[in-house]
Amino acid sequence: MRHDPMLAILADLLRRVDGLAGERGHVSVARLRDEIDRIRHIARAFHLDGVESLAGTLQSALSLQGAGPVVMSYLDLMRDAISAEMPAAAEVLAMPVAARPAVGPGARLTA
C-alpha cells in the first residue's frame, strides 16, 4: 500500500478541526484564531479552496463576534469540506465514532 501524502494532510486537518471542536469553551479566542489561521494556511498550500474559504470566513466571524455559537457550525462545515476531499477508501476513517454501528453485550445478529 502506498502512502498518500494528501491523505495525511487531510487527516491532519481533520485532527485539528476535531481538536478545536473538542476544546470548545476551553480555548481562548486568540488561540482559536491562531489554530484557524494554521488550518487556512495548510488548506491554501494544498489547494483545498473550500476549507480555506471557510477558515477565512470563520476568522472574520471571530473578529466581529468573538467565540460565539457560530464557531461550531463553521467547524462542522470545515470537517465536511475536508471529508469531501478524501478518497472513497478513506471515508471510513473520517466517520465519527458516534456514527459507527455499535453492538452491545448479548446482542444477536440475525439474518
Image: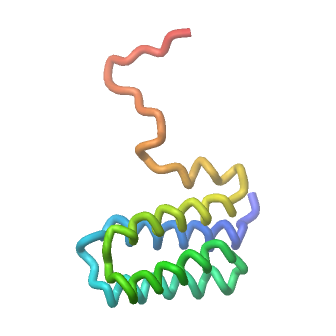
Of 40 and 110, which appears nearest the observer? 40
Q: How is the image coloured?
A: rainbow
Tag count in the figure?
0
Quadrant into which the N terminus falls:
bottom right
- Please name the residue shown 32% across and 83% down the image: 66
From the viewer's perspective, is 89 left or right of 102? right
In the image as oriented, which residue stretches furthest toward the top?
111
Quadrant into which the C terminus falls:
top right
Question: Looking at the picture, how far across and down is residue 9, in whole percent?
Answer: 62, 73
Q: Quadrant of residue 44?
A: bottom right
Of 15 and 32, which appears nearest the observer? 32
Question: Looking at the picture, how far across and down is residue 27, in whole percent?
Answer: 28, 79
- Please name the residue shown 61% across and 64% down the image: 81
Of 63 and 13, which appears nearest the observer? 63
- Please name the residue shown 39% across and 83% down the image: 62
In the image as oriented, which residue stretches furthest toward the left?
26
- Please name the residue shown 39% across and 66% down the image: 72
Of 57 and 46, which appears nearest the observer? 57
In the image as oriented, which residue stretches furthest toward the right?
2
Q: Is residue 102 above or below residue 24?
A: above
Question: Looking at the picture, how far across and down is residue 64, in whole percent?
Answer: 38, 86
